[in-house]
Image (cartoon, grey):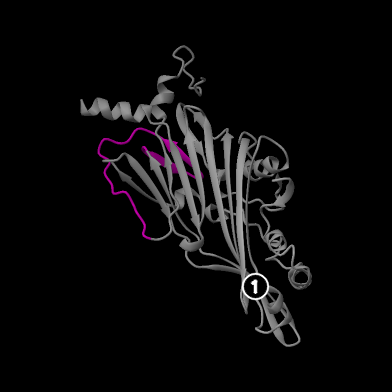
Amino acid sequence: MAMENSKKAVSLTALAVLLLTLAPMTNASTLTVDLNPQTQVAKVNSLSATKIVLTYPANSTIARYLENVNSSESLNASFTGGTGVRELQGSFDNGDSSVAVRNMTVALSYSAKGNATALVINKSTNITSYVTGVFKVTNGTVHADLGWRAYVVSGPMDLDMHDHTVDINMVGSMVQDSLATRVFALEFILSAFGGSGVWNSPTLNFTALNTPLTSWTKNYDASTNTTTFTKTIPGESTFSATFSKDGQDYTLSVVSDPTGAVVVHGYANAEANSLVIVPAPATSVGVLAAGSAMVVAAAAAAGYLYFRTRRPQSSGKAVLPTW
């Protein structure tokens, strides 16, 4: 009876999740991919949390303009096409035109606070999109293609939100939006940093996952039928630019500290940037890896038996099920 229940659980489970965490826990960015072999649709949740810091000398002219800044805004909208969807689609392609974005919703929020020596902007962009073309069947085996998971939107991503156009991606755009009413200060910052790399840095950037899944550490927990792939990317990356005027320094910076892990519900093997979903070996045992650091996790359901039972008997070729 236990074996029958186990087989039934494997055949009915149809969920996969990939979660990426970037930057310190207080300012974490996450990428979650929820894969469903039954519907052949992936729900992709991208949360980009970015901290932008502008430092300036105390008692400087800029300090007087920025030390009392205290503003915030929240915007949200849904899209079934248009420039934003095409930008996200282009970032997901990864040379594979089968991956397609059907629609997406976007929630953008930011706060800007200034004091005598620094302006801090906290920006959060949450994109939930629905993607097709992730699952494939090769020689009767189900593959979940995750090569596109390390996506980056390299340019502006302009969206119409609440009756005005907003670039939800670039660092410079966020600084401009936050200081739209502080004309003198914004003109100075544009002059000092407008051509710098940090000004033109994207915030929708998950390239920390750009390592083959085969290089990640794998553990299998038979008691929960869960496979865990873990990967930690050590160190902290700081993107900054410095401007000097009249012997005084001004700095604009963005900081990230990526680490990660992948968790798969069901038994899966990694092949480059794909997960191959197969029946668990009868003798498999393991321990579910749990990190105390910031975690990237993905859970993928074992749809192997489901696809096998849907395979036409006459042709002998496995096909994806249709509903």
Q: Nearer the viewer, residue 264 or 23?
A: 23
Name the spot of residue 125 as percent of width and height, x first: 59, 52
**Mark 1 belongs to which amino acid?**
Asn
> In the image, residue 87 lies at what x, y percent?
69, 44
Based on the displayed image, in which of its 4 quarters is residue 241 positioned? Answer: bottom right
Q: Is residue 59 above or below residue 135?
A: below
Task: Verify whether residue 274 appears in magenta.
Answer: yes
Residue drawn at (20%, 25%) of the image: 1
The reply, left or right, for residue 167 in relation to residue 289 is right
Q: Residue at x 36, y 57 (%)?
A: 291
Q: Which residues are magenta?
A: 266-292
Taking 30 as reference, is 192 left or right?
A: right
Q: Residue at x 53, y 36 (%)?
A: 42
Q: Does 25 sit above or below residue 300?
A: below
Q: Which residue is mark 1?
A: 68
Identify the main secondary structure in magenta.
loop
Residue 269, magenta (yes or no): yes
Location of residue 305 (image quadrant): top left
Question: Residue extending furthest left?
Answer: 1
Q: Position of residue 196 (x, y in %)?
A: 73, 68
